[in-house]
Image (cartoon, grey):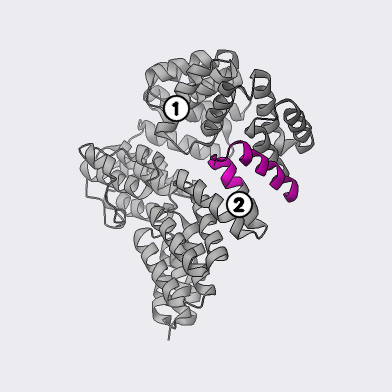
Amino acid sequence: MNALMLSLLLSIGASAPASAQANGGALDPEQLMREGHPVEALEAARAGVRAAPQNVEKHELLIDLMNNLGLALQGEIAYLQFAQDNEQDPMAWYLLGRAALDPVRAGTAYAKALSLEPSYARATMGLASVQRALGEAEDSVELYRQAVTAQPGLAEAWSGLGATLMDQGKVSEALEVCLKAMVAVPRDREAYLAASVLEPDMALDHLQRGVKAIPASPELRAALGRIQLRDGNYKQAKANLDLALSSDPGAVQAIFDRAVVGELEAGRLDTDGQAMLARARSLIQESPVAAELGVRDLVNQYPDCYLVYLVQGHLFIGLAREIEAVTSLSKALELQPTSPDVQGALGMLLLNMGDAGGALPLLNSAYSARPWDVELGVSAGMAAANATGINTGVTALGAVADAHPTELAPVMALVTLLSQAGRPDMAYQVLSRAVSRYPHPTLILSKAAAAQDLGRKAEAAALLRELEELTGDSKYGSMAKELEP
C-alpha cells in the first residue's frame, strides 16, 4: 500500500503533553481528546497511521477525529486520493466511504470495496449505515446482521444494528443485540450503556459487568455512579464519579452528579430531594411551568442546598427572567462561593446583561478551575475587554485561542475585537497563525476576508480558490474571480 499523501497528514504542529511524554511517548488519541488536547490527539492518530498503514482501525480513528474537529472536507479529499492511488485495495475504498460526507458518495465507495472483496464486513457495515441514513431501516438491519455474522468482533456493527432496531421501536430485539454484543465484543462500552437504558431494572448489573470488563471507561464509571447515586449508595457513587472525572473532567452530567453527592454527604439534601432535583432538571426544557413548581418546592424544603438555586437560576435564564435568575444564582454563590458552575452561570448572565465588571472575576475564577471549557474562556476574555479595555481582552482571548487551537470561537472573538479596534493587520496575523495550526474552512474564509481588507487581493483570491477546491463550492471561485486581475 502506498504511503498516505501529504494532504492527509495536514501539518498542525504540536508537541505532546508532558504527561504523554513521561509515559514513554505512548499516546492514546481518545485519552488526549478527553484531556482537552485535540491537536495532540490528531497528531497521535496520524502517527498511528504512519506507524501501521495497514491497520484499518488506526485509519478509522484518524477519520473520526478529523470529522469531530471540523476537518471532514480535508479528510474526504485525502482519502479520495488514497483510494485512487490504491485502486485494487478494498480497505482504501472502505475508508473513503467512511470519510465521505455525502451518503450517496459513501455508498458508492462501499460498493466498490465490496466489488473487490464481497465478504468485507466493514464495507457491509458502512453500506448499512448509508441505508440507515437514507431511511431504509429494513435494508440497514439486514446488512448489519450480515456484517456481525461475517465478523462478530466488529463492535460498530453491533452498535449500528441495535440503534437501527431502536429506530424501529423494536426494544426487545435491540436489547437482545446488546446482550450478544457483550459476549462477542466484551470491551465495547456501548453495549453495556445501551443495555442499561433498554433494561432499566437491570441497569446496575449491566454497568457493573461493563466496568469489570473495561475498568478505565469514564462513560461506564459515570453511568454506574449515577445509578448508585439513585439507589442511595453514595460512597460507591462518589468513587465511580471521581474515577470518571479523573479521565474526563469535562463530563457535564458526572460533574453535577458528583456535586449532588457532596450535598447529600453534607446533609443539605436527602434522597427525596435528589429525586425532586433530577425531575426538575429534566422538565426545564419540556415543561418549564412544571419545573418551576418543582423548584419552588425544593427551595422551601432544602433552603441550604446551592444546587437548588443553581437549577432555579438556569430555569429563569431559559424563561428570559434575568433579574430572578441573578437573585437565584447569587444565593447559590452565597452558599457555595467556589463552585465553577455557579460562578460561570452567574458570570455569563451578568455579561449578557451588560455588567462586565461584575462578570469578570466570576468568569476568571470559573475558567481557572475549568480550563477545558472554551465558552468560559471566551466569556472571560470578552468581559475583560469590556471591563478593562480591548488590550486586556485581546491578551486573554489570545491565551484561550492558544490553549484551544481547534476551537473557532476564541479566534473569531479575538478577530472581532481587533477589527473593532481598527487593527486589521493584527486580525490578519491572528488568522494566519490559526490557519497554520488548524486549517478549518471557516478560518480560511476569514483569512481571505482579512487579506482583502488589507488590500491583498491576490492572496485573498488564492485562499478563495483553495476553499473552492476544498469544498467543491463554486461560489468561492466566483468570489475569487472578482478579486483577480
**Marks 2 and 1 close (CB-CB < 8 Å):** no
Q: Which residue in the protein does label 1 denote?
A: 242
- 441 or 394, nearer to the observer: 394
Is 296 placed above or below 462 here? above
- 471 or 208, nearer to the observer: 208
Q: Amino acid at mark 1?
A: Asp
To which quarter of the image does residue 198 belong? Answer: top right
Question: Residue farthest to the front?
Answer: 334
Which residue sits at x=28%, y=40%? 19
Where residue 278 appears, x then y in whole percent?
Answer: 65, 28
Where residue 283 appears, x then y in whole percent?
Answer: 71, 33
Rendered-image quadrant of the N terminus:
top left
Magenta stretch holds residue 328: yes
Disc count in the image?
2
Which residue sits at x=46%, y=16%? 208
- Classify residue 468 as left or right of residue 282: left
Disc on res. 348 = 2
The chief SS type of the magenta part is helix
Q: For mark 2, does the 10 Å Cα neighbourhood hold few (<14), some (14 to 19), or many (20 or more) residues?
A: many
Q: Is residue 387 visible?
A: yes
**Segment tinted magenta in the rendering:** 322-345
- Classify residue 159 as left or right of residue 230: left
Magenta stretch holds residue 383: no
- Classify residue 333 as left or right of residue 405: right
- 57 or 238, nearer to the observer: 238
Q: Amino acid at mark 2?
A: Met
Secondary structure of the residue carrying tag 1 is helix
> How far apart in space, not on screen, are marks 2 and 1 (Cα)?
27 Å
